[in-house]
Image (spheres, coloured by chain):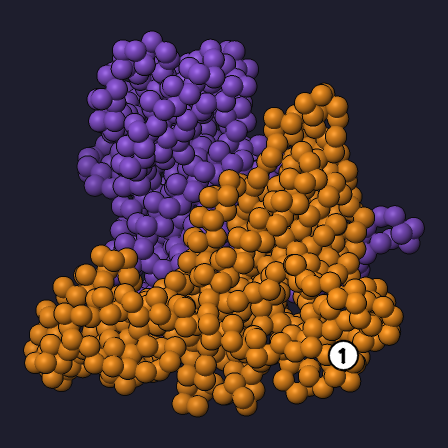
Chain colours: A purple, B orange
Amino acid sequence: MSKGIPSRSEDYSQWYNELVKKADLAENSAVRGCMTIKPYGYAIWEKIQAELDRMFKETGHSNAYFPLFIPKSYLSKEAEHVDGFAKECAVVTHYRLKNDESGKNLIVDPEAKLEDELIVRPTSETVIWNSYKNWIQSYRDLPLKLNQWANVVRWEMRTRLFLRTTEFLWQEGHTAHATREEAIEETELMLDVYEKFAQDFMAMPVIKGIKTANERFAGALETYCIEALMQDGKALQAGTSHFLGQNFAKAFDVQFSDKNNKLEYVWGTSWGVSTRLMGGLIMTHSDDQGLVLPPKLAPNQVVVVPIFKSEDQLNAIRVKMQPFIQALRNKGISVLLDDRDTHKPGWKFAEYELKGVPVRVAVGPRDLENETVEVARRDEKTKEVVGMELMVEHIDQLLEDIQINLFNRAKAHREANTHEANSMDELNRILDDKGGFVSAHWDGTTETELKIKESTKATIRCIPLGNPQEAGVCIYSGKPSIQRVLFARAY
Amino acid sequence: MSKGIPSRSEDYSQWYNELVKKADLAENSAVRGCMTIKPYGYAIWEKIQAELDRMFKETGHSNAYFPLFIPKSYLSKEAEHVDGFAKECAVVTHYRLKNDESGKNLIVDPEAKLEDELIVRPTSETVIWNSYKNWIQSYRDLPLKLNQWANVVRWEMRTRLFLRTTEFLWQEGHTAHATREEAIEETELMLDVYEKFAQDFMAMPVIKGIKTANERFAGALETYCIEALMQDGKALQAGTSHFLGQNFAKAFDVQFSDKNNKLEYVWGTSWGVSTRLMGGLIMTHSDDQGLVLPPKLAPNQVVVVPIFKSEDQLNAIRVKMQPFIQALRNKGISVLLDDRDTHKPGWKFAEYELKGVPVRVAVGPRDLENETVEVARRDEKTKEVVGMELMVEHIDQLLEDIQINLFNRAKAHREANTHEANSMDELNRILDDKGGFVSAHWDGTTETELKIKESTKATIRCIPLGNPQEAGVCIYSGKPSIQRVLFARAY
C-alpha cells in the first residue's frame, strides 16, 4: 500500500500497528510499554471521555480524584485482589536522586529510601475503600457513586499500542450501596451505559455477559463485561462492571448503621473502560486505506478541499463556501477547511482518507460555475455530485447514515462470524478457519475451561446475559451442560 | 465558630485547613503529602479545567498525553533542569511484589529490579522534547503547540492541601517555534490567558511579571508569572509561563531545516497552572462562615430551599417554583432544589453558606401567598424579598454582580495592601504589621535577593511587566537600582 501500511489480509497485526502510527494516533515511547498519545488520537479520546462523562453524570455519578500511590500494605488487605495485582505493578522505593561521586551520573540516593514502599495504582479499589471507611457511617451516606478519570499502571510483559500498555488512561467508577440488590442493579446499569456508548457512539456492537469465575476481577463476586468482535475474528473485552459484594467493605472495615441502627457492611461495585477502546474502534471499522471513524467520535466530521490553480480561484472558492461551512457548523458539525497551498489535493485526499474523516467535500472552479460540490463518504468510498443549495442537508443526513451504516456493517460481520460448535474438533476448525465467536456447551468447571484454553488458545469470553438454557454435553469433558457459552481467541 | 472552623483572625492557616476539609473540597490521604480531591472540590476543578481548555484551544493548542514515567537519564540532559528536579522525585526501581517466605507479607521482588530507574514525572519537558526530536524536521512542522492535563509528583517535605502536595493535578503546555520572537510571543500570550482566566473566572486579580534569575524555572531563560495576594497578606504564585530559549532543543537535539534548508535549533516554551489555583480561589474570597465562590466557577450557582411543615406545603412550593427553576436553567444557570425532609432549613442555610453557593433562594407558604421569594447573596450576606415574576431576571443579574463584586473586593484588598518601602526597616515593619506586596528598590543581584530573603522571609515575587524605570538605591546594599520590584512573603 502506498501509505506504507500492509493490507489487513497480508498481516492484520502489522496493519494495526502501522495504522496507529501513520494516522498519528499514538506511538511507543522510550519507556518500555508506555505510549505517547498524539494529538489526533487524543482528540478522539477526548470525545469518548466527554460522552461517557455525560452519561455517568446523567446516571447520578460525581467525579473525584484519589492518590496515584497506594501503600503496599493496602494491596494485601483483600486476599484475591493482591494475587491479581501484586505481580505486575510499578514500585516506588525512593524519593530522591543525587549525583554519584564523580558528579557526572545521577543515582538513586540510598538515604532516601521509603519505609513502606508505594505502588503506582493498577486500579484504585483499595485506596478508595480506605477513604470510604471515613466517609460512610449511616444509611444516609449511601449510595455513594463516584468516578475517577485517571492513569493507571500495570507492568505488562507484552504490550501493544492502546490494546495493552503499561500505563493507560481510563475511568474507574466505585460505588457503595446499602443493599446487595441495589449494588447489583448499579453493576448492571453501568454495563448498559457501556453497551449504549459502544453501540451508539463507537458504532461497535457488543455482547453483554458474565465472566466465568476464572476470568473474574480479583476481588469481585461477579464480573459483567461487554465483548466485541474485531475484523480479524478475535474478540476484545471492551468494558467491565464488577459486583464486589462486601469484599472490599470487609477488607477495609466499611460499615454503616441502617435505619434500625444496625451495623452492616456496605455493598460495592466498580466498573471501567480505558484507552483500549481506541483499539476496538480502530479494529472494528478501519480498512486498507486507513482509519474509518464513526461521525460521532470523529474530531473532524467534514473536510473541505478546494481544487485550485491560482490564488484567485482559491479566494473565489473560499468566498463561495464560507456560508455553507458556517451553516454546517451552526448545526454542530465540525468542518475543517484545508486551504493550504503547500499540499496538492491528491495528497490531501489520501491524508484525510488515512485519518478517517467521515465526509470529504471537494470544490473546484467548475463546481463554482455549476453550483455543485463533490461529496465523498469515507466508509463506502463512494462519491456523488450535490447541488450547493442541498449540501448542508445532504451532509447532515449523510453523517447519520454513515454512523448507522458502520454499526450495521460491524454487526453483520459479527453475525457472519458467530458459529456453534458441538465438538472440540469443530471448535478448533472454526477458530483456525475464520475465528469469530463460537457458541459451545461447557460443563461449568474452571478445570475444563483451562484445558480448552490450553489446547485452542480460546477463552470463554462470557456467558451472555439472557442466555437460553439448553441441555447438552460439554464439548471437552462430555459432562452435562445447561447452556452454551461464547468462546473466542481474544486480544 | 459553630462549624468547627476557627475565624480567619484567630488562625488563618488553621481556618484554611479546616475550611478545605469541612467544605468537602479535599482531605489528606494515607499516603504522605498526597491529597484526595472530594467530589465538591473536583467539581470546581472541572469548571476550571473546562474554561482553561477552551481558552487553550481557542489560541490554537491541542491536547496530547505523554508517559507518566521518565527514564532517569533524561533528567540529566538539561544541566539546570536536573538540579531543579532530581532532589524531590519519586523513583520507581522495581516492577513486581511477591510474598515473603512466610507467605504472609508482601515484599518487593528483588529479581524484578529495573536496570534504568524511572522517575514519576515532576514536569514533562524532558519526555516531551525527546518526542519532539522525532516530530520536528522542517519549518513546516512548526509551530507545534501542545498541552497535557496530567498528574505530576514532587516529593515535598512540607505539604498543604491544594497549595503544595506531593501529587498534584495540572496542565502543562509545551510549544516549539521557529524563531525566538515567536516563542517569546507565545510565552506572553499564555501569560495573558492565565491573567484573563484568573480575573474573569476566579475573580482573582493578579500581577503579571517576570521572575528573578534565582526564582526562574530550572532550564528556562525567562519565567513569567501571575502573582495574587491572599487575604492574610501573603502572595501566591498562581501560574507560570516559561521562555525556554533553545535549552531543551539543544539538550534533546531538536533541529529543523528552515526555508533556506539551514538547520536550526527549535525555540521552546512551557506553561502551567495546577490544583494550587483551588487554594488561591479559597484564600481570595472565603470568609469566617465558609467558602465564597465566584458564580462562574460554582458547581451550584443557586440553591432553592423550601420552608415547609407538611408534605402538602412542600408540594405546593415545588409546583410553584418549578417553572422559575426551569427558566433559570434555560439561561444556563445551575440550580439545586434541596427539598429533603431529613434536614431543617436552618441546617441547609448553614450548609450552603459553608459550601459557598453564590445565591440562596428561600420560599415558604407565606411567600406563595405573596408571590415572593427571599433571595440571599453569599458574598455580602444580604437578603431581599423579590417578586416571583422578577426572580429570574433578578438572579441572573445578581450572579453577574457577585462575580464583579468579588473581583473588585479582592482588588481593593490588594491595593490597600501594596506599599512602598525605602529601607530594610520599613520593609520589615510592613511585612510584620500587615504583610502584602512591598515595592522596593533592589540592586538586581541574586546575592542581595537571598540576603533579604534570609532576614525577612520575603521573596521577590516578580518584576511587574511594564514596570516604571526609576533610579534609586537598593534597600539592602545601598547600590544603585533602576527599578522597584515586588516583595512579599508567599505560599
At label 1, the amino acid type is Asn
Which residue in the structure is indicated by mark 1? B422
Which residue is depicted at the point 45% across and 28% down?
Answer: A457
Question: In the drawing, does residue A380 fall left or right of residue B365?
Answer: right
In front of the other: A94 or B105: A94
Which chain hosts label 1? B
In front of the other: A44 or A161: A44
Relative to residue B252, is residue B243 depicted above or below? below
Quadrant location of residue A381? top left
Relative to residue B92, is residue B140 depicted above or below? above
Relative to residue A361, is residue B458 depicted above or below? below
Quadrant location of residue A292? top left
Quadrant location of residue B226? bottom right
> Under tag 1, what secondary structure?
loop
Which residue is depicted at the point 35% across and 72% down?
Answer: B357
Which residue is depicted at the point 52% across and 85% down?
Answer: B8
Could you tell me if residue A437 is visible in this image? no
